[in-house]
Amino acid sequence: MSKEGLLTRQSCLKQVCQHHDVAELLEEKDAAAGSAFVRGGGSKDVFGEDSATVEQTITPWSRIIASGLELLRDPRYNKGSAFTEEERDRHYLRGLLPPNIISQELQVERILHNVRSYENPLEKYVAVMDLQERNERLFYKVLIDHVEELLPIVYTPTVGEACQKYGNIFRRPRGLYISLKDKGKVLDILKNWPEKNVEVIVVTDGERILGLGDLGLQGMGIPVGKLALYTALGGIRPSSTLPVAIDVGTNTESLLNNPFYIGLRQKRATGTEYDELLHEFMSAVKQAYGEKVLVQFEDFANHNAFRLLAKYNTTHLVFNDDIQGTAAVALAGLIAALPLTGGTLADHKFLFFGAGEAGTGIAEIIALEISRQGKHTLEEARKKIYLVDSKGLVTKSRYDSLQEFKKLYAHEHEPCSNLVSAIKALKPTVLIGTSGRGRTFTKEALEEIASYQDQPIIFALSNPTSQSECTAEEAYKYTKGKCIFASGSPFGPVTYEGKTYTIGQSNNCYIFPGMGLGCIVSGAIRVHDDMFLAAAESLAANIKQDHLDKRQLFPSFTEIRDISANIGAAVAAKAYQLGLATRLPQPKDLVAHAKSCMYSPTYRQYR
């Protein structure tokens, strides 16, 4: 490297300051002009990376300008064989790469060819997630362009198996690991994270991973996967996301006895010890990243999920995807089904099999939506909803022994010991499974609901696939083609008596990326229930007659970024309406504004 090619520390810092000043100056100018146009980088794009157009050049900053092997080993800037001749000379890559230059599009095809060569889904997962560690933009390009094929690989159902075997397939740490050993040092740990402008955090304590139970620290696969989808589906910049796993131990003996387990080898902490660590984390997050950092609670067990949400939703920008995200996407499916069944939500009777976070979360958002229509109070709306848990129908006679979140749905009724007896007694028109127990919508249960209802709505929402209450084929077979079906796990089309039905997947991926985008573009400081209602209505609006002809209640994922932009705009609009937004003035066209802020994975040219 020639002397002329070296940048002194002083000149590097000068360029950083110049970029920072220019970014701030442009923001101030836009704010003064009341402009609704926002560059893609948002308010913290210090180096102008994301605010540049695809045609403009950017500088591959690390701590200094990256070059040579350092550039090739930095996943944020590495382009592999796609570096141009000029870039190879300018950044000292000549000889470090094969001579043939390959386009990003051809790289995508090569990655897909390799992934498709694996038969085992877990092997595909490892191959795709390894790409994220080598070449970030290529990873997101592959995922965005082929989302329907790869979504079941990077998230449910395959991510469940990945979490179960996380210690075995562990290669390189991603995110932050905060354990009981770190009490009193959580803020210092957050400072160790190299990105300082974090906008979205997904955090889990690993106690209730999907339908698989307590996986301890190996639950980190969920925050990592969720945040990959925040970027791919919602356009959130990867550098502004942070996966976090809180390690308080695990009660799963097989993990404690597994030599490859990566977490603390102790029983799970509870009570004050647990609460103090969580509170230190939540306090440190606000101190490190400010009032507007979004914290998504993920896969906490019921006894912690509800109380943590209640504790922090008035002081932090937080939501629980298992409670609120699942609820919003299920509500969207129910709204979408109304043209098929006729009437309104208030005309239906709902029976839930499973009364945990997901079940009660969906129940409450249904009650909120019914009450918002004006003909029923919230209390009256709740009386249309019944829950069945592991002990049978939730009734007033069990009130004193019920967990708090179930008590709102404890109605006066004779006891029913199981699902079938509850269906016979209540005659619901909507059956929703959130039990995490596979094949519990039995032939008898499905035949019973079809015996008195012409078009029963049946949602088998548990995942992964092995935990689904029934398959799509079983639902159509045992209801003789009458049902309107959706599932939490992916199922292929089903043909019954010559008619083919497309199965809509009630997947949280429709909601949480748009929710995150809406909070960021509006600068929201709190999450309100009405923001989830707005998200659900926006999602349901994507279902047209051609979808209904196939009884498809959720749209194709091929248009998910447009869907997320529209959901983000709806969420942002509600935040502005409720006085929770801080990015003022409100843009005139929120959809265009949301799209302008979305991350693009296309390679940039380096100066």
Image (spheres, rainbow, N blue to C red):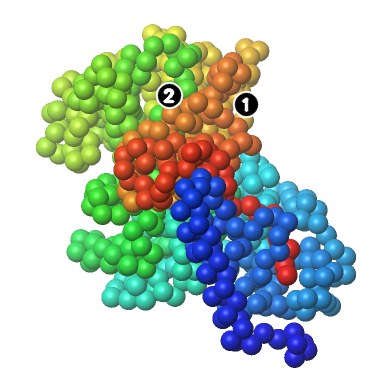
Q: Nearer the viewer, residue 441 or 233?
A: 233
Image depth: mark 2 or mark 1 in front: 2
Residue under the point 85% across and 63% down = 101
- Could you tell me the amino acid type at mark 1? Pro
- Could you tell me the amino acid type at mark 2? Leu
Above/below status of 117 relative to 568:
below
Q: Secondary structure at mark 2?
A: helix
Q: Earlier in the sequence, mark 2 or mark 1?
A: 2
Q: Secondary structure at mark 1?
A: loop
Q: Position of residue 141 (x, y in %)?
A: 67, 52
Residue under the point 60% across and 24% down = 502
Q: Position of residue 205 (x, y in %)?
A: 36, 58
**Quarter of the image where one finds residue 2:** bottom right
Residue under the point 50% across and 57% down = 29
Above/below status of 575 relative to 477:
below
The residue identified by callout 1 is: 493
Q: Which mark is residue 179?
A: none
